[in-house]
Image (cartoon, helix red, strand yellow):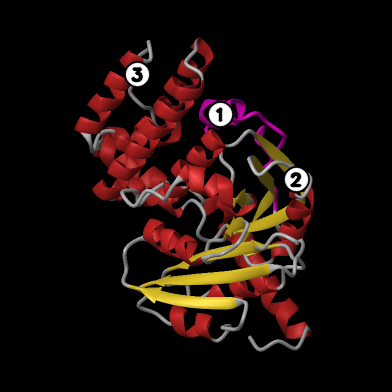
Amino acid sequence: MKPVVSILIPAFNAQAWIARTIRSAVAQTWPWKEIIVVDDGSTDHTLAIARQFESSQVHVISQENRGSAAARNKAYSLCRGDYMQWLDADDLLAPDKIAKQTEVALNESKRTLFSSSWGYFFYRPTKSWLPRTSLWQDLEPVDWLFNKLDENIWMTSQSWLVSRELSQLAGAWDARLCADDDGEYFCRVILSCDRIKFVPEAMSYVSAINAGSLSKSIHLSRKKLDSQFLSICLHIKYLRSMEDSDRTRSACLKYLQRWLIYFYPECPDLVARAKDLANELGGELNLPELNSKWDWLRRMFGWKAAKRISFAMQGTSVLPSKSWDYVLSKLEHSSQGHVL
């Protein structure tokens, strides 16, 4: 029998894009699939829109707002698939994404984890750009985690195809985390796998409209900062559990240093804990520095204000491209006879 793939979609206040996301799941050419949407107490029309797609293959569940990790755990508890395809409510899958990975999986162990290509897009997935990194290749689990921390890079959650066996070994999503819960979860999946197989022909798309919003706003929320720091500590713990060597400790130190700017100077307790962890790793951290072009702001208004302004300005350079892509998407829809 062909393996069933469960497409699991947690959703919260995603009325602007949930229909598009569900359509991309329904359109998967792999016929042996189920789609489970868990609405996490949305206050907009997300639930009503999702329910328009209910069928023998599409199941929509609603729960009180308990966070993305809880919504993901609920979706997993209801699924029956042999493989899991996680899909955020604003992102998309290419029609043959699951088929490409599953065809490879048929000849692999259930302990093999499958990654794939992915790209950012504003309004037109066909015009996405691909942020290729050293993770876009077949890798041993320890080398994958090493590259992630050493280069501060990542793989979107949509890119993975995870067997039920690996899902069970990894355990539940960590409901303590409201930031980087996906990064921490897939570290545990990687800890449990035998190897990572990269399937370049499979493709998913990440909305650049919302991508990076967490990293730009995380310093404004103590809850998110605590969550991110916990995830960082767990990343370091997981890598060292696989290989505690000079190269892995060096990667962990680089990872801490790159993230320190998010905690400094607002959270002196987290900065102190980061320094203690660096000492445990055999090194030390330097105080973070802002880009030199913001130095005049630092001199006039202080470090904290300059940091907030610099973070708020991140991404403004792409606004013209984003606006132009929006116009072109509307023109394309109009020429195709779609209702705007």
Indicate the secondary structure of the residue bearing disc 2: strand
Q: Is residue 21 left or right of residue 97?
A: left
Return the x and y of residue 307 as percentages of the image width and height. Answer: 34, 40
Q: Quadrant of the C terminus?
A: bottom right
User: In front: 68, or 154?
Assistant: 68
Give the residue displayed 61% in from the left and 81% down from the top: 56
The numbered mark, 3 or 2, whose residue comes first in the sequence reads 2
Task: Report the span colored magenta.
Answer: 129-153
Q: Give the residue at x 26% y 49%.
A: 223
Q: Amino acid at mark 3?
A: Ala
Q: The N terminus appears in which quarter of the rendering? A: bottom right
The residue wearing badge 1 is: 151
Q: Does residue 162 appear left or right of residue 201 in this picture?
A: left
Label 2 near label 3: C-beta < 8 Å?
no
Disc 1 is placed on an element classified as helix
Which one is earlier in the sequence, the residue at label 1 or at label 2?
1
Q: Earlier in the sequence, mark 1 or mark 3?
A: 1
Disc 1 versus disc 3: distance between alpha carbons? Answer: 17 Å
Report how far apart the C-alphas of labels 3 and 2 lie in the structure: 36 Å
Residue position marked by numbered label 3 in the rendering: 278
Could you say which quadrant of the image residue 278 lies in?
A: top left
Amino acid type of the residue tagged 1 in the rendering: Glu
Q: Position of residue 111 (x, y in %)?
A: 63, 40
Q: Are marks 1 and 2 in contact (CB under 8 Å)?
A: no
Q: Nearer the viewer, residue 4 or 136?
A: 4
Q: Residue sitting at 70 percent across and 63 percent down?
A: 125
Query: Is residue 196 depicted above or below 91 in this figure?
Result: above
Q: Callout 1 environment at 10 Å: few (<14), some (14 to 19), or many (20+)?
A: some
Marker disc for residue 199: 2
**Does 142 sit above or below residue 311?**
above
